[in-house]
Image (tube, rainbow, N blue to C red):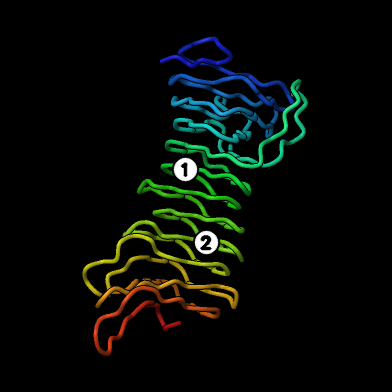
Amino acid sequence: NPVAFGGVSVGTLDLNLAAGGLAYTGAIGGNGNLNINFNTAGDTFAIANANNFTGTINLGKDGINKGTLQVFSGTFGNIGETALGSGVVVGGPLPLLINNPFIFVPPLSGTVNFGIATYTGPTTINTGFTLNAISLGGDVANSGTLNVTGAAGIAGSVTSNFGTINTTKVGGSVTNNIGGIFSASSSAATVGGFLMNSGTVIATSPLPAVPNTPTFTIGGAFNQTASGTFDVRVLGPVSDYYQVNGAGSTMAGAVQVTGSKALGATTYTIVNAPGGV
């Protein structure tokens, strides 16, 4: 299972970066193991070009210094860590990299595909960029588009700024700011902590066949500010049903109802929370 790095193929490649990080403008391919060792904690390894590497990337393989992988486009395999707290940045400006002999102007948009990501540091998606992943192991700051399709979802907490997040699960809490769209894309979608909404919250999984079956479960409180929109779908006798397990929920802003209701007078429970909302 080789790694093709700059035209050289090896089964496992240990990449030891010099202090200050590196912007790499060559090609990375294959399906082997790419181990990245950071000279100084917080250094960045930026992969400038689109690549198709389906192997495993291990951040801080020596276990000494955590660092950041920055990517702009392409398909990558599973991404893990040995140095805890390593993270990923998708798009955005390059940091000041001492070891950057090439003139590289970062693109303004791109799509990145990950497999299973178990690194525990933050994932940052910048405006104009899309990240598709099976799962993410840490916190997320999103200003672009994030699609997480695996049952494990996002392990940490989420902050969304003028971006869109589609996910099956969030282990921590969600802060969805003005302009953000947070979409629960699984019938078993859950948020482990609170959900604070100043943007739009929607559920996109198919509606259940039985009324009052949760389409979205929130472990903490659900609070919506005056700028927020809470989207509810109805179809015949069923509707979205948000099960909120934390106390102290409040709702300002708008409730947007779409779909078609059953004939005659119909009552729908859309939020079930301790003490009401």
Lower position in the chain sequence, tag 1 or tag 2: 1
- Image: 251 above or below 150: below
Q: Mark 1: which secondary structure?
A: strand
**22 left or right, relative to 135:** right
- Indicate the quadrant where residue 212 lies: bottom left
Residues at badges 1 and 2 in contact (C-beta under 8 Å)? no
Q: Label 1 amino acid?
A: Asn
Q: Which residue is mark 2?
A: 181
- Indicate the quadrant where residue 89 lies: top right
Q: Residue at x 52, y 32 (%)?
A: 74
**227 left or right, relative to 206:** right
Q: Label 2 amino acid?
A: Ile
Q: Which residue is mark 1?
A: 132
The 10 Å Cα crowd at callout 2, few under 14, some 14 to 19, many 20 or more, is many
Provide residue 96's location: percent of width, then percent of height.
Answer: 77, 33
Q: Spatial distance from mark 1 to mark 2, Cα to Cα?
A: 16 Å
Provide residue 95's location: percent of width, then percent of height.
Answer: 73, 36
Q: Mark 2: which secondary structure?
A: strand
Provide residue 4's location: percent of width, then percent of height.
Answer: 51, 15
